[in-house]
Amino acid sequence: MTTAVVFEKARAEGRSALVGYLPAGFPSVEGSITAMRALVDSGVDIIEVGLPYSDPLIDGPVIQAAADAALRAGTTTPDVLRVVEAVAATGAQAVVMSYWNPLARYGPERFARDLAAAGGAGVITPDLTPDATDDWIPPARAHDLDTVFLVAPSSTDERIAMTTAQCRGFVYATSVMGVTGTREQVGDAAAVLVERTRKTTDLPISVGLGVSNADQAAEIAGFADGVVVGSAFVRRMLEADDDAAGVAEVAELAGSLAEGVRRR
Amino acid sequence: MDTLPEAEHVPMQDTRGRFGPYGGRYVPEALIAALDELDREYQAARADDSFGAELDHLLTTYVGRPTPLTEAKRFGAEAASGARVFLKREDLTHTGAHKINAVLGQALLTRRIGKQRVIAETGAGQHGVATATAAALMGLECVIYMGEEDTRRQALNVARMRLLGATVVPVSTGSRTLKDAINEALRDWVTNVDTTNYIFGTVAGPHPFPTMVRDLQRVIGVEARQQILDTVGRLPDAVAACVGGGSNAMGIFSAFVDDADVALHGYEAGGDGVATGRHAATITAGAPGVLHGARSYLLQDDMGQTVESHSISAGLDYPGVGPEHAWLKDSGRATYEPVDDSAAMEAFQLLCRTEGIIPAIESAHALAGARRLGEALGPDAVIVVNLSGRGDKDLDTAARWFDLLDENGDQQ
């Protein structure tokens, strides 16, 4: 599987793809599946299934709160794979967003095999750069999975080239220096980074960190192939009166963002 | 003083800062540029005589180095089966623990890089106090991240840091201890990396921290090795140190690691006992994995989630350990054992009563280890213990443990 087809389709439609993140297991395994299905129904093209981790050092307080809740509820790596399977069954693309240690502990080869079997398209690894280990890319390639690595405003041109050469599916450009969370402005740094990244690759480039509304999504869609939204969804679920209200809230936001990525 | 030379044994396989299969850099791409800058500037500073001279000057005139090597005769006779026990007195440094050695080096580097703001994590508070001290000395803005749980256990050190002008941020995520303080400091760094240097407290974290902090702490071992030769006329049979993240242990071990006849012993926090699961004995009971940017031993569950550690000593209460210790363990060059809270506190009290020295509870774990070594090696043995810090900060904990507070006092 690969997410490349999603970006091709979006490009053919003259728009950017919408990528939505939610942590698996929050508010429960079934609850996270329901919420992700609602995102798909409301126009999200690719679901980032977050694997909750005890030490999420690039995540802000919103996502950490949800991840902590998922872990307290006993969410396991097999649960995450079950969520992937349920999302893939809708016909949408599912990629796992995971810090490295849970994958290393599960076994990179075993994880790649089981993720492919669940219908997952790939993995985004926020704390793993391509040069950090030789243990991930070979099994991911062997099981036809996308390997999505991050580039940052602080990356040198050499590192951007090194990183995009090892990406498959798409490249994840972090819009600002910082952790996940909604921001008033995502600003010029993202556009500059996307431009620098384009010089090194033909892969689609998605921009994440800080996007929370349709106007921001439209702004990003003006220069990027994909728009990633995470904390804004998670915050709505955390603040909702109950699970059903949370699902309705994220569906509404997804619909609004889906309109945003279609503005031109 | 010979502060900076690197130990020759170090198995650096590549530029990624690996010790065998351990170490490396498992961090967000956003931090790589800062780590590269730090590594580059550190290498340049090492080669720059004026940097070494400035650091040595500070270590001599500000920290009070060299620290003495004190023979603990009564402790050896009464508590360590008659062995000759020598204490490397890092408790006598300015700020009261070895942390200041590596902090001053990193603060000088910060100035060299041209950044005006420093951040640090702290567990017991000693690294935070040392960082706040260096920041005051050099006129740098300073923010210290400390687990909420630790701000309670070490309230006096919070006050010390604030007196020194630092901002102390209590961290209320996760286990609210050192592990989470490091997460929060890394988040600050990734956000403010243009203006900020991260002064790391131990030999863990991503490359170059394990190497850099070890080199800056190596002065402990270099001095101790010469002092024991001058005093006894031979190398010791064993060197003992407590291990949380492992900086005081790496500092003293690294000067002896090429002396094959000197046994190196690290003592981890056994908490309530390893069998209870409530401990911080990472090497003894953990498995290899990645935490805070490096691969090393780690307390983790089947899913790779970090398991909370427990210890009476805030400074050892950490579920990870420096990668070079993992390598020394696997290679057999050093051995690591747990010391339970009760054994550490017994050794703590014994040193108070026999030598008139109140050690940090962290260092008391090494003293408990020395007692075992004395029993195993006998009265002819020479044992050097790294007394990494003093116990002023631990008086409240000790008073509760030994029930020393007046019946009519505030025993709450």
Image (cartoon, rainbow, N blue to C red):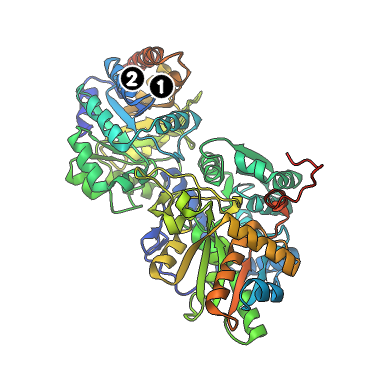
Q: Residue furthest bottom?
A: B233
- Would you name the residue on which mark 2 appears? A35
**What's under tag 2, amino acid-wise?**
Ala
Camera-nearest residue between A90 and B89 = B89
**What's under tag 1, amino acid-wise?**
Phe
| Residue B66 x %, y % | 70, 72
**Is residue A33 positioned above or below A126 on the image?**
above
Q: Quadrant of residue A242?
A: top left
Crowding at label 1, few (<14), some or many (≥20) Cα neighbours within 10 Å? many
Q: Quadrant of residue A167?
A: top left
Dot label at residue A233: 1
Camera-nearest label, 2 or 1 = 2
Q: Residue at x 62, y 87 (%)?
A: B233
Q: Are marks 2 and 1 in contact (CB under 8 Å)?
A: yes
Q: Residue at x 59, y 61 (%)?
A: B365
Marked residue nearer the N-terminal end (2 or 1): 2
| Residue A158 x %, y % | 37, 50
User: Where's the N terminus of chain B, which quadrant?
Assistant: bottom right
Camera-nearest residue between B142 and A262 = B142
Residue B165 seen = yes
Cα separation between marks 2 and 1: 10 Å
| Residue B251 x %, y % | 56, 67
Pointer 2 chain: A
Residue B4 seen = no
Left or right? Give the position of B389 relative to B336. right
Q: Residue at x 64, y 47 (%)?
A: B116
Camera-nearest residue between B91 and B404 = B404
Q: Secondary structure at mark 1?
A: helix
